[in-house]
Amino acid sequence: MPRNALTLPTLDPTSIFEHFRGSFGTELLVAAVGEFRIFDRLAERSLSRSALQAQLGLVERPFIVLTTALRAMGLLRIDAAGQCSLTPLAREHLIEGGEFFVGDYLGLALASGGVQEMIARLKSNRPAGADEEHGAAFIYKPGAASQMELEASARALTLALAGRAKNVAPHLAANLDLTGVKKLVDVGGGTGIYSIALVQRNPGLRACVVDRPEVLRVAAEMIDEYGVQERIELVPGDMFTTPLPGDADAILLSNILHDWDVPENQQLVQRCAAALAPGGRLFIHDVFLNDALDGPLPLALYSAALFTLTEGRAYSAAEYRAWLQAADLTPLDVIPTLIHCGVLEGVK
């Protein structure tokens, strides 16, 4: 009997993921106090965003990851004019020499492996493993070593990511209206679980999953288990260079863009938009920071996790909308799914 990808989890596992990512709060806070001394830098006066970034010696991506978390913690403010200042909470407890200063207590964790690793990632702006023989774990980039090109590690990582996806996929299928869509291209689709759920939910739908060859070995097995072999095509390739099928009514980017920096994301959105006919739909299924990049805290910490493992971070709906509009797509509203995820649609 084929498996059913539309079965919803009885209980919401979101809190499990929040606890799992909670360690990044410790790492970022201790780094901000003990290494970058952000609060002492802002003790006497506010600084412009660019001035603070220059003093910290950080490029844009790590600066956003760090300051988004501190803003979500209620410790840092950045106003509409880009001026950075301390909140009353930070001013009372995180300026050295203050009566209620707790920075030395936080500093007890400065030498810990996790904090030092976070500091190294923030300063280098490179994911963990990027300089090692087998490369980074969760990304593939031409010319760079990647664990996604090795059969054993690609299988392990792909199946690990499917753990969350199996919980979210039935919610995506239940909430995404694919009326009129006959063919969907799932770019970077991994095990294909999102496509599996969508074709099971929509009897007239066919799907095409584009991903690396070693990943698609796992996808083929998964598609067989769910009995949808005749309705899902597997296309090995590189989503940045492999031509996308030109007969698709819709393209899905599910938890893909958060792995990449802004230029790569703009390029990928442009590629997808170009492959769609007028009226075609691009679905961005991901998490969404607040448009002001000041939280919510669980997603700010998830952004830090993404930052340490990939070349990306979490983005806001405003950032995604700007990329869609630049690709001549009209953004619609975000539709929630599960575990902080939602779908933002752009129509050509």
Image: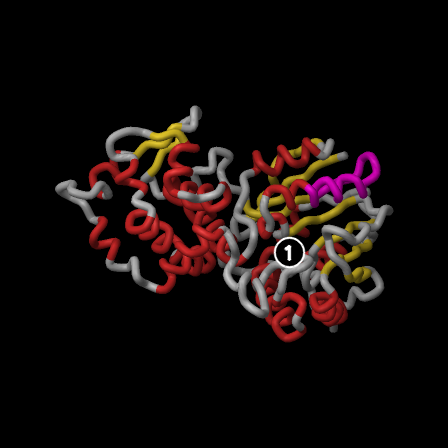
At mark 1, the secondary structure is helix
- Total numbered labels placed on residues in the image: 1
Residue 113 picture location, percent across and down: 36, 64
Q: Is residue 158 left or right of residue 242?
A: left
Residue 274 is one of the magenta-drawn residues: yes
Q: Is residue 71 above or below residue 149?
A: above
Residue 212 picture location, percent across and down: 72, 62
Q: Is residue 62 left or right of residue 183?
A: left
Residue 292 picture location, percent across and down: 47, 33
Q: Quadrant of the C terminus?
A: top right
Q: Is residue 344 above or below residue 312?
A: above
What residue does disc 1 label?
Answer: 170
- The residue at the point 63 percent across, 75 percent down is 152
Residue 88 is one of the magenta-drawn residues: no
Residue 321 picture location, percent across and down: 62, 34
Taking the view exactly as shown, the residue that stands out farthest to the right is: 247
- The residue at the point 47 percent across, 47 percent down is 299
Amino acid type of the residue tagged 1 in the rendering:
Pro
The magenta segment is 267-282
Closest to the observer, 343 or 133: 133
Q: Is residue 132 left or right of residue 158?
A: left
- The residue at the point 69 percent across, 66 percent down is 215
Q: Quadrant of the N terminus?
A: bottom right
Report whether residue 226 is seen.
Answer: no
Closest to the observer, 172 or 80: 80
Q: What scheme was used to colour the molecule?
A: secondary structure
Closest to the observer, 257 or 14: 257
Report whether residue 56 is seen.
Answer: yes
Taking the view exactly as shown, the residue that stands out farthest to the bottom is: 152
